[in-house]
Image (tube, grey):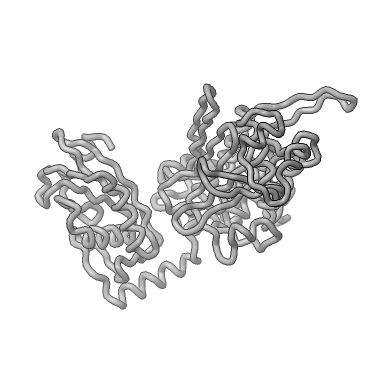
Amino acid sequence: MATEDVQGLLAGGEGEALEFKATLSDSRRIIETIAAMATRGGGTVLIGVRDDGSVVGANLAPGEQERVVQQVLANTDPRVYVSLDTPVVDGKSLLRITVPPGDGPHLAFGRAFHRLGKATVAMSRDEYERRLLDRLRESGGFERRLAEGVDATGLDEEAARQWFARARGRLEPGMKGEGALELVERLHLAREGRLTVGGVLLFGRWPQGPFPQAVIRARVERGALVDSASLEGPLWRQIDEAVAFVARNLKVKTEVGAAGRLEHPELPLVAVREAVANAVAHRDYRSTAPIQLVLTEQTLIVWNPGHFPPPITAALLRERHPSVPTNPLIARALYLAGFIEEWGTGSLRIIEAMVANGNPAPTFEGGGDEGVRVTLPLVAPVDPKSERARAALKRFKGGKTFSSRDYAKAARVSVRTAGLDLKALESQGLVKRVGVGRATRWVMT
């Protein structure tokens, strides 16, 4: 945040959307204020400023910012995902807590609060129930809420037409031949002449204006090869750009044989597209964290700030399962445009594409506040029938444990190659890891 912007806040004084606190000592009151601001539509808490606007500075202990975020998440319901930064005014560092518009009313320590002028006041039961009913009338989803300050002029008609061209084959007959706004309304992403949150994210002129978190941060970490990008714009365009980013940074092995010229990419792009499309469809757009995509020498990791909605678990993703999208309207729009092929099959398509390309199986992880992580290994697995693996593993039968160095000697390969072999064999259930770190040993299963 620019210094002049902070000074502008200081000059304006406290109000419904702004609170000053000299220190973090009264953390309970600060969290109550954060919940109240989330309920009213967002706001800012400045730490290191007295009530009169004088700057004293925030003397933060190491790890203090992380503790603030965790305390807010632990004591608000629905959780408030604040973002923090440390602007400097008059040579003194402040802590700025930005409170996003919430899916309120929000509770703090089990009670509801709202802002009356510059005061945080406990909400009466009648007021809480009224606001809760208002929230339920929004049909229960953040994507369905009307976006603040975005009317029909915020619609990118060109983006809507391009989406329409991609979705034409899956659209219902009654949805064809309509104008851009009418089409978006038929998708339940606009009403009353205004775009919903989902409508802005999919068809807005500048979705990152009201929702700066709705981006994909992509980077490559492969030795000397360094590449990074911040992918913005409508969500469905981000998916195309993310796949293109990965494709340009993958290595391709070319073989020429009787069947002609064959190319073997390190990863099947269909698996990449499925992983990114699912992250976009299922992430929690209330969170201020972006989707993250990291390509290394060994893996592609796609992480999103979301969770597995019941009854979905990481284990269930390896078999046919019900479709329970976090954002059903966004997911439906992606399905109609061909980014999602069939409900409830995205993880299975990833697994099938990886196996067909000769890659180890992907892993799915997540739960709680950790977000959801999909890891796609780049290294092709060792064929267990190959002479190298078969000859090496013969020496370690009967439950005998061995190290990667032992395997390297038996297979006559480098220790690094041995490590890759063993990870691939582990993914196929042929060996099992025992111990961690330098004490890691292996045993045949």
Query: Looking at the image, which residue is at 62% across and 37% down?
Result: 404
Asked if 290 appears above or below 245 in the picture, the reply is: below
Query: Looking at the image, which residue is at 72% across and 51% down?
Result: 398
- Give residue 110's position: percent from left, percent from top: 32, 71
Asked if 169 appears above or below 343 in the picture, the reply is: above
Between residue 184 and residue 253, name the one nearer to us: 253
Between residue 393 and residue 99, name the one nearer to us: 393
Observer able to see residue 311: yes
Where does the N terminus fall, quadrant-wise?
A: top left
Between residue 48 and residue 438, name the one nearer to us: 438
**Left or right placement of residue 383 versus residue 275 in this view:** right
- Give residue 181's position: percent from left, percent from top: 56, 49
Observer able to see residue 336: no
**Left or right placement of residue 184 versus residue 391 in this view:** left
Q: Quadrant of residue 111?
A: bottom left
Query: Looking at the image, which residue is at 56% across and 33% down?
Result: 296
Query: Looking at the image, which residue is at 22% across and 40% down?
Result: 6
Numbered disc total = 0
- Give residue 240's position: percent from left, percent from top: 61, 37
Asked if 136 appears above or below 421 in the picture, the reply is: below
Between residue 102 and residue 269, name the one nearer to us: 269
**Left or right placement of residue 142 versus residue 391 in this view:** left
Q: Quadrant of residue 128?
A: bottom left
- Give residue 122's position: percent from left, percent from top: 24, 70
